[in-house]
Image: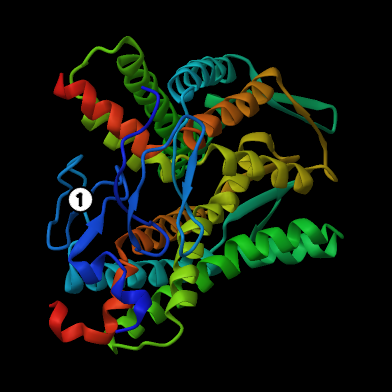
């Protein structure tokens, strides 16, 4: 075990509560200080993360390929998908906004899923590779996930404002709900993942 | 309470187990391994949480009361309040989307703020109100699900999309919503978790 891992709480059979910061024994499932649910141990954390990840991966497809808005313009209705919207913005010259939406709605969720899947796999294979970087990467996914909701709110505001009957109106598409579900499930996946497991990988068999 | 008691802590970032010493007022403790802010002694935290949570709730009420956004094109004008803008999603056949938006931008923030007012006033009055521990635990768990600031960025992006098609205007309630978000961010970021819990526990022990 590396020196880094040895001074960690997990190696000493302890864990900190993310809600109230008090220290409990590692096998405890509820915090002694505030009663919050703690990470439930090896198998459950990885299983839950996979379950949420698979759900979000399934939602990724309807979110990206079904129409997110229907726009009616002088009687003619066109539907647009999330990526279609990004392309339109780009063509109109709103490059900055196009990039923001593309990053927040397409890259971040996909990247987050790939990172969490990689972290789960590396815990399961007992890898000791780049643990500090992987822990940092995990904290980044924990932090940025919520920001993907931007596009859901954009759709809500467009629908709320553009309601001029036949002249111009916007209706929401089912992809918006799938998208919100995808954001929520990736957030739940990263909440379920226990980053300390990365450090325990080296001696997985003793930790069961 | 001038100093916070020293105690063992686990760094949220890197899982280092460390004994954090007692902190004098205004002092902060950083993780020696990854430099994450572990704990701080902020003597004014309760006053600030209480004041900003109450202001934030008032701004939230105001942002429901007046026109939120306006839109005009082809000689037609339209202004909507915040609640109308959510209600439209129901009439446009996506009540689930309306529920998601309402929950993340109004309901959860409101619940968070009411909880923050409850806990901070219990601590300020030095009275043990029922369920303080449960309320504090719940509002800390709700925090990542409040999406007011993301909603504001969403409005900005929607405006960029609309601006070439029509004129858009910001109502009184929009500005109120901005102030609500700013105040709520202070409530979320300013207090120190460890210090809050220490006070809640000492209150319940009396």
Q: Residue at x 46, y 75 (%)?
A: A132
Quadrant hosting residue A94: bottom right
Q: Residue at x 66, y 65 (%)?
A: A102
Relative to the observer, which residue lies in front, A31 or B73? A31
Specify whether B165 is left or right of A157: right
Q: Residue at x 31, y 68 (%)?
A: A8
Q: Which residue is mark 1?
A: A37
B72 to A205, vertically: above or below: above
Badge 1 element: loop
Q: What is the x, y in percent for residue B13?
A: 42, 60
Instruction: Give the colour scheme of this rendering.
Output: rainbow
A34 to B32, vertically: above or below: above
Asked if one can make out residue A165 in the rendered structure from this viewpoint, the answer is: no
Q: Residue at x 61, y 35 (%)?
A: A160
Q: Quadrant of the C terminus of chain B?
A: top left
Q: Quadrant of the N terminus of chain B?
A: top left
Quadrant hosting residue A67: bottom right
Q: What is the x, y in percent for residue B116?
A: 38, 25
Asked if one can make out residue B82 in the rendered structure from this viewpoint, the answer is: yes
């Amino acid at each position: 075990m590396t020196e880094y891992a040895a001074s960690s709480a997990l190696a000493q059979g302890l864990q900190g509560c993310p809600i109230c910061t008090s220290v409990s024994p590692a096998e405890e499932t509820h915090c002694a200080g505030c009663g919050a649910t703690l990470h439930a141990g090896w198998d459950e954390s990885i299983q839950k993360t996979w379950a949420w990840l698979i759900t979000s991966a399934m939602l990724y497809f309807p979110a990206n390929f079904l129409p997110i808005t229907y726009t009616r313009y002088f009687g003619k209705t066109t539907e647009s998908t999330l990526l279609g919207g990004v392309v339109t913005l780009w063509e109109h010259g709103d490059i900055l906004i196009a990039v923001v939406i593309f990053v927040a709605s397409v890259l971040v969720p996909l990247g987050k899923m790939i990172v969490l899947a990689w972290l789960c796999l590396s815990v399961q294979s007992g890898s000791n590779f780049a643990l500090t970087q992987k822990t940092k990467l995990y904290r980044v996914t924990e932090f940025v996930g919520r920001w993907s909701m931007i596009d859901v709110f954009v759709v809500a505001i467009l629908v709320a404002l553009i309601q001029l009957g036949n002249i111009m109106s916007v209706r929401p598409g089912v992809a918006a709900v799938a998208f919100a579900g995808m954001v929520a499930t990736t957030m739940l996946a990263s909440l379920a993942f226990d980053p300390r497991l990365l450090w325990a990988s080296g001696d997985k068999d003793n930790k069961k | 309470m001038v100093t916070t008691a020293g105690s063992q802590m686990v760094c949220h970032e890197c899982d280092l187990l460390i004994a954090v010493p007692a902190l004098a007022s205004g002092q902060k403790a950083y993780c020696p391994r990854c430099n994450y802010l572990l704990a701080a002694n902020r003597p004014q935290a309760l006053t600030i949480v209480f004041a900003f949570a109450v202001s934030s709730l008032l701004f939230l009420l105001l942002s429901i009361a007046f026109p939120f956004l306006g839109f005009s094109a082809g000689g037609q004008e339209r202004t909507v309040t915040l609640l109308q803008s959510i209600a439209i999603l129901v009439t446009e056949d996506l009540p689930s989307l309306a529920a998601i938006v309402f929950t993340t931008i109004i309901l959860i923030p409101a619940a968070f703020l009411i909880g923050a007012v409850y806990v901070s006033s219990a601590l300020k009055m030095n009275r043990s109100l029922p369920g303080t521990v449960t309320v504090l635990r719940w509002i800390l768990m709700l925090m990542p699900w409040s999406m007011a600031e993301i909603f504001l960025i969403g409005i900005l992006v929607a405006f960029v999309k609309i601006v070439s098609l029509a004129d858009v205007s910001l109502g009184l309630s929009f500005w109120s919503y901005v102030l609500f978000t700013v105040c709520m961010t202070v409530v979320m970021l300013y207090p120190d978790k460890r210090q809050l819990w220490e006070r809640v526990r000492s209150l319940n022990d009396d």
